[in-house]
Structure formats: structure tokens, C-alpha cells
Image (cartoon, rainbow, N blue to C red):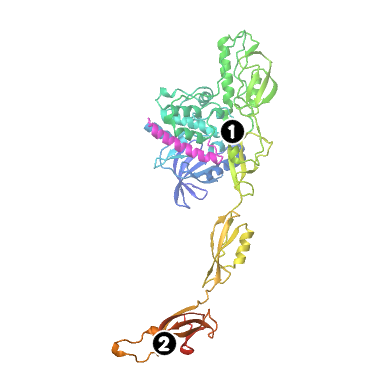
Amino acid sequence: MIGRLLSERYKILKYLGGGMSSVYLAEDIILNRNVVVKMIKVDAHNEEKSRLRFQREVQSTIQLSHPNIVNVLDVDETDEYQLLVTEVVDGPTLKQYIEENHPISIEESVRLAVEVLTGIEHAHHRGIIHRDIKPQNILLDSEHRVRITDFGIAKALSETRMTETNQVMGSVQYISPEQAKGQDTDERTDIYSFGIVLFELLTGRVPFSGETPVSVALKQISEELPEIDDYRPIPQGLKNIILRCTEKKPADRYRHVDMILADLSKYDTISTPYVNSVDGPDEQTIKTDKIKPLAPPSTPAGEGVKPPEDRKSGWLWLVPLLFLLSAAGLAAYMMFPEEEEVTALAMPDFQGMTIESAEAVLSEYQLEMGEVTEDYDDAFAAGEVIATSPESGEVVAFGSTVDFIVSAGPEPYTMADFTGGNFTDIQGALNDINFNRIDLNEVYSDTEAGTILSQSISPGEEVHPDEHTLVLEVSQGVEPVEIVNFAGEPYETAREQLEQNGFNVVLSQELYSEEVEQGFVISQDPSYGSFLPGSTINLVVSLGTEPPKNMLYSTTVTIPYGETGASGGDEEDGEGASDEDNPPKRVDIYLEDANNPDIDDVHETIEINEDTSYTVRLEIEPDGRGMFRVEVDGEQVIDEVIPYSE
């Protein structure tokens, strides 16, 4: 195999190991980088179906992109193998790290656990369950960061033959009870396996071991987890997390990974021991005269009892049957001699079995199938036996009819009509229904913000909330309207368009502008953005170019009195004539300007008896002129014309 070129791209360099697949280091000759190639041989008896199943399951893992997940780079196939190509992670597996570094500090263990959970959570949010979480599938890179590998492989190979004993033993030490029974799996399957990994991370050993995979699987189904403090004292909060993760019934475990992360964040604050909220079955003492010793089933292993559709194939489906027959048979042989003829037997415990498996066991015990009724039950998955009549442990005769009560799953919830209500007001009620997830799709609407407009599950429809995502369309209120900046546009155009969009328009100011034409918008406030209809938009509008201003002219002139009327007088006495002795003269002042249109109209008349100063003030229009004239006793003494100047 070394040196072989696969898919005309991957040159095999080195064998790295095996398990579910043969793992090689290879060179990607196209991108010139090293990669890991996992060569997986599918079931030869059903090659096409297995090949398609592999392609479907593993292709979905390419979407996973997370710091704690090994990246899948390519999925391909040859004539002999399915190929899974991943990035190279340079570092040990978590299994090797535990073996070489135990005991690992509590703080380091919690850090590693959080990274494992974060990677699992990323996959779960995308609908991908690992189904084979174990330290061998968890790598530590050069930065000591957790990298989970082999997502999707376990399910892809669930219909193929797994003949590697070590691989089976390695997986069975971490599988959940429902996997051991061949039942359906979900997120809680990975949560159980994580609990076993956390136990090993803290104690350095797995909780269940045995000589064969079947013996270990039986312990996963029936035995309680060993007392952790027997190996190492750890905080009560961590013990509680492990115990809840590894509950035998999936319904008793954490429902989602984020719940574990929340508890891990406060593990050192918890001092109360974990108590399972669901009580176990009461112990019973059975008394009988004659109970038949039970022999192993005559049907060869793997034949005769067909597992239900979509259940795990291979050896796993035999575990519950082997456990039931061997335990019941051993008890009977210990109580009675072989030679004693018996006519009755102790009623087996069918609880948790599928009705198909129960039918096979009835045949082995020479019992008949009676009435099968369904009842809702939160503790048992749909199709699993809840109870029998006669009950487990009762003495029954051969040929007796056994009635079964089979779980129809949790009682469905009849969907209420939440439309028209306010989401905030009914959020608490929605959370109490316990939907798997509630997604809000917020849309603009004329209805009040927060009003539920529609729901993805119709009113009256019966659903199991924990299996459904409820999508609610919720009003955000009226949609804001993005405004256009109308600067430079005609005012009337701006006003009409803004009012059509529901805005109030205010002409806040009119200004002269050298740049903006008269009647056009100079500016607006607000100038851009999205606003609710009814908002006010202020517009500043141009008056056009500012016209020239009138010229204000001012000058002071001296109005001459002229000759005084006094004669020589008596100079020898030193006395001369005074101004008051001058007779007054009449002065008429004429103006022509913006305010005085006719120069012939007297503007003002005064009297003087001496030379007198007078200030003339004119307001002269553009392209016009100003004039003023002064007459003293009818005689013109001043006449001036003042042209306009800027």
C-alpha cells in the first residue's frame, strides 16, 4: 500500500493504525500537503447500499468547521474502499495522554472536558451525532487543543461488519445503554459517552471492563457507575455531572450539551450530591413451587430474531436477549434440580424492549403474545415496552398469554394558537412547553411590535415539543423608511415625495444662496437614514441670489449764512455785533433717493443766523442716484448728485 496513489491525488506515505478503518499518512500531490487518509471497506454483502449510506453520512461532516473538530477535507472512493481524508493533527490521542499523565489536575481535566463538549455541541447544532465518542477519537494538537475526529463514521458503518475485536472492545467501554440494546440514538447518546470519558479523565480508568464486548455491554445496561471517590476524591459538582451524563435512561440525562457546559462553569460551587429524579423499580421477592430452568435459546446467534428497521445491526442487538436469557436461566438452575419437572416460570422483565424483541423472547419462553396497547410515557421511547400483565417476576404457566403496554412516546402537545399575542407576554408559557428550540423571525408589519403574526406549527396540531423547532414570525412594528437627501432638488418635489412616504415636512428657513437656485432645497435635517413614518423632516429652501443692497450715503455740509446785516459799530468801545443780532434766514433742503422720489419736494426747512453744519443722509438704490439741494432764502447754495456705488 505504501507508495500507492489513490484517486490520482493521495500518495500513501505511512501506515498509522487501524480500527474501523485503515489509517494512513498521505501526501496530497495537488495541494502539496500531508493529509490523513482513512480507508474503509464497506459490507460486501450489500455493497451499493453501504456505499451510498457511507457517502450520505460522511459527506454531512464536511460542513463541520470548528477549532475542536478535525477538519474533513474530502470524501472519495475507490473500487475497494471508501476514503475519508482529514487534516493531520500532530499530537497524541486523549487515551495516550491519560495513560502517560494520570493523575491529571482537576483544572486541566475541566479545560479538556469543556473543549470536548464545545466540539460536540457544534456538531449537534448541525444535526450530526458522533455515536463513538471515546478518548481514542479525541486528539490533542501541538497547542494542546482538543480535536475530535471520526464524526459520522459510526453511523455510516452501523450496517457494515466490524470484525476487529480490539475496536469493538474499545468502543463498547463507552457506548450508551441504548446503543447496547440496539435502540435509537440521539444527542444524549454522545452525552453518555462523554460522561464515561470524563470519568476516565479524572480517575485514569474506565468504569466498566470485562473479558468480552458482550460482558462490558451488559454492564453498561445494568450496572451502576462505580463510586468515583474510590479512585480519587473530586469535587461534588463534577461527580454530579458524570452521574447525570451516565444515567441509564436517556430521558434522565442532560438533554443538550450546553446544559453540561453551564454546570461545568460552576462545578466548584456545588456541594449537594446528585439525586436521580426518577425512582428505580422496587425489589420483589418471588415465591413459587416449580419454576422451569431456562436453557439458552436454540436459535443460532444472529438468526431468527430480526431487529426492527433502522436499529443498530451486528452483535449489538443480541445484548438484551443474551442478558435476559442468561440471567433468568442461571436463577432457575440455582433454585431447582434439572430433573424436576416444572410447569411454570418466572415472568421475564420486558421493560425497555421493543415489541419485536419481546415477541422473540416470548417464543423462547413458550409464552403467547396477548393484547398490545399503547400509552404515552415520558420515560420510554416510542415502541418500547412499559409494562406487562402478568408483571415481571410473577409465576406464570407455559402457554400463558402476556399483555403488553407499549410506549407511544411522550404525550403529544396540542398546539395552541399564539398568533395575535405579544411574544414578551407569552414567552414564559412557550418556554414551559419545552420545545427543542424556538426561533424568531422578525418582520416589519403595521401591527404593534412584538405581536406574533404566524407560527410554524398549526393550532390544533399534535406534536412532541422536544422534537420540534417552533418558528414564530414576530412583528418589528412599522418598517422605517430610508429617506433621500433632496438637497439641490425642487422644494415642491421634495415635499411631495416625503409626504407620500408618510413624513411631516416643515419649511424651516428660507435663505439667499449663490449656489442653489430659487425654490430649490439647500439642506434638510435629517439628511439621511431610515425613520418611521410620521417623523418630521426640516427643509431649508433657497431664495435665489441675494439682490444688491441700497447704498447708504452720508455727508456733512456747511450751509453758508452769507453776509451779516450789521454795520461798522463803535469799535472804540470794543463792542461789536453778535450772531444773535443777525436776522434768521430760511433754509430749504431738498433730497432725492430711495425714500424721497422727487427732488422738488422740500425734505426739511430750518432757520440759521450763521454758517451751519448739516448732515445729509441718502439711501441710493442700485443703478440709481441720489441728489440733495440747499436753498437759503430761496437762493440755491448747494446742489450735488451722488451716483450709486457698491
Instruction: From the viewer's side, name the closer residue of 40 and 264.
Output: 264
Q: What's the CA distance linking mark 1 and mark 2?
A: 110 Å
Q: Quadrant of residue 89?
A: top left
Residue 165 in the image: state x and y as whole percent: 50, 30
The residue sitting at the bottom extreme is 568
Work out whether residue 32 can be spotted.
yes
Q: Is residue 422 above or below residue 398?
A: below
Q: Is residue 108 above or below residue 356?
A: below
Q: In this view, does 345 lie above or below 274?
A: above
Q: Which of pointers 1 and 2 lies earlier in the amino acid sequence?
A: 1
Residue 310 in the image: state x and y as whole percent: 62, 34
Residue 475 in the image: state x and y as whole percent: 61, 46
Q: In which quarter of the image is residue 567?
A: bottom left
The residue sitting at the right extreme is 371
Instruction: From the viewer's side, name the closer residue of 603 and 639.
Output: 603
**Label 1, on which residue?**
432
Instruction: From the viewer's side, name the closer residue of 221 and 305.
Output: 221
Q: What residue type is labelled 1?
A: Asp
On whether residue 397 falls in the magenta region, the answer is no
Residue at 63% x, 23% y: name it: 386
- Secondary structure beneath disc 1? helix
Please provide the residue range marked out in magenta.
Answer: 102-130
Q: Which amino acid does label 2 sit on?
A: Tyr
On whether residue 124 falls in the magenta region, the answer is yes
**Label 2, on which residue?**
561
Residue at 56% x, 15% y: name it: 283
Mark 2 surroundings: few (<14), some (14-19) or many (≥20) residues within 10 A: many
Check if mark 1's residue and mark 2's residue have beta carbons within 8 Å.
no
